[in-house]
Amino acid sequence: MVAGRERTLPAADVADVTIRIGSQAGRTPYYDVTVVTTAGKRVTAGGGIPDKREAEWLAAMVQEALRTG
């Protein structure tokens, strides 16, 4: 996997953190953790996660970190 550029978003600009299928190899989906901004833009925060539960856990941890600041 190739690392992308680093980006910083203010917590106030984050409306939601979700997961979505970013790619698929055969029948195996790979999930992306996606940040949805208050402007409606989607930003991939991480990707290539083969386990849906792990991707959901990671998204929940990001959401919790945003809430507790």
Image (cartoon, rainbow, N blue to C red):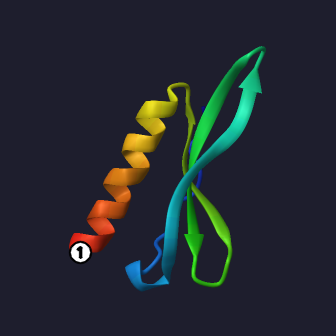
Where is residue 34 drawn, in percent x and y?
Answer: 57, 56
54 vs 21, left or right, is: left
| In the image, residue 20 above or below residue 65 | above
Q: Which residue lies furthest to the right in this view?
A: 26
Q: In this view, does 66 lie above or below 54?
A: below
* Quadrant of image for the C terminus: bottom left
Residue that carries the numbered disc 1 in the rendered image? 69
Identify the residue shown where x is 59% and y is 51%.
Answer: 4
Choose between 43 and 64: the one closer to the eye: 64
Residue closest to the eye, 27 or 45: 27
Is residue 2 in view from this perspective? no
In the image, 1 versus 30, the foreground residue is: 30
Left or right, 40 with reference to 54: right
Residue positioned 56% across, 43% down in the render: 3
The answer to which image quadrant residue 12 occupies is bottom left
Callout 1, which amino acid? Gly
Residue pictured at 49% horizontal, 83% vertical: 13
Image quarter of residue 32: top right
Query: Where is the N terminus found, in terms of image quarters?
Result: top right
Residue 19 in picture, x, y percent from top left: 57, 48
Q: Residue furthest left?
A: 68
Identify the element where label 1 is drawn: loop
Residues packed near mark 1 inside 10 Å, few (<14), some (14 to 19) or many (20 plus): few
Residue 49 can be seen in this image: yes
- Is 31 on the left-hand or right-hand side of 57? right
**Residue 38 x %, y %:** 58, 83
- Residue at the image position 60 percent from the left and 37 percent from the top: 31
**Toward the viewer: 33 or 60?**
60
Disc tally is: 1
Does residue 49 sit above or below 63 in this rendering?
A: above
